[in-house]
């Protein structure tokens, strides 16, 4: 089986506080949940999408891991939400507000879910440059479940909205 079929991909984003430090802390914790293989993208600076006027730019990245035995999509989502809280995420209820940390479960192998708390794969990942640019860096040939084209092809089909790869890696 292709290793990408076993991988879990998590998107990380931040546009408040010390974003790079926060993303690296989150990535280190997420890496602890991996059985072995962990890959991290570069950090990308992206313009806010569908956010409040005047929102600062985001720093985004993607991490890929092979989860330890017993980790399910639901338990991983719970861990990601708890990690957001630990790293200072506050939720006011406003949609797409600036945030210190945002962790999105993009895919969990080839698993699919459609429940009140979890939709897999992430329903908008394939149309978001801030997810696809860093994901292409670590898994260009990955086909997101439900899509027919690779991450690389999906990214090429999107209009460029100014994602800039920084000279910094998620893992230092």
Image (cartoon, helix red, strand yellow):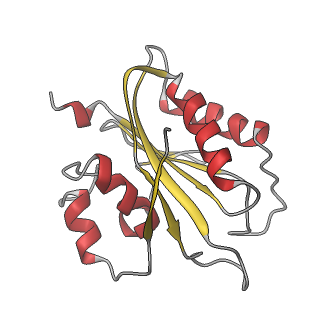
In this view, the residue farthest toward the left is 1
Residue 146 versus residue 126 in the image, above or below: above
Image coords of residue 130 (percent x, y): 46, 65
Give the quadrant of residue 160.
bottom left
Q: Quadrant of the N terminus?
A: top left
Q: Residue at x 33, y 33 (%)?
A: 7
Would you say residue 128 is visible in this rendering? no
Image coords of residue 108 (percent x, y): 39, 37
Q: Which residue is at the front of the view, 145 or 159?
A: 159
Give the quadrant of residue 97.
bottom right
Horizontal relation, residue 6 to residue 49: left or right: left
Image coords of residue 83 (percent x, y): 69, 36
Q: Residue at x 50, y 38 (%)?
A: 172
Horizontal relation, residue 18 to residue 90: left or right: left
Would you say residue 65 is visible in this rendering? yes
Q: Which residue is at the front of the view, 2 or 58?
A: 58
Q: Residue at x 22, y 61 (%)?
A: 152
For the image shown, how many numbered marks are present on the structure? 0
Residue 94 versus residue 60 in the image, above or below: below
In this view, the residue farthest toward the top is 69
Image coords of residue 47 (percent x, y): 55, 76
């Amino acid at each position: 089986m292709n290793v990408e079929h076993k991988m879990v991909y998590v998107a990380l984003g931040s546009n408040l506080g010390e974003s790079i430090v926060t993303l690296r802390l989150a990535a280190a914790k997420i890496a602890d949940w991996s059985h072995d293989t962990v890959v991290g993208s570069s950090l990308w600076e992206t313009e806010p999408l569908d956010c409040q006027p005047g929102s600062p730019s985001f720093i985004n990245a993607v991490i890929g891991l092979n989860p330890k035995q017993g980790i399910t999509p639901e338990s991983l989502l719970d861990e990601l939400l708890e990690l957001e809280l630990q790293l200072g995420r506050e939720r006011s209820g406003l949609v797409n507000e600036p945030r210190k940390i945002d962790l999105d479960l993009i895919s969990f192998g080839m698993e699919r879910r459609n429940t009140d708390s979890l939709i897999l794969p992430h329903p908008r990942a394939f149309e978001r440059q801030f997810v696809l640019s860093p994901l292409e860096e670590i898994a260009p040939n990955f086909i997101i479940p439900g899509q027919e084209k690779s991450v690389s092809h999906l990214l090429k089909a999107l209009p460029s909205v100014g994602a800039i790869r920084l000279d910094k890696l998620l893992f230092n």
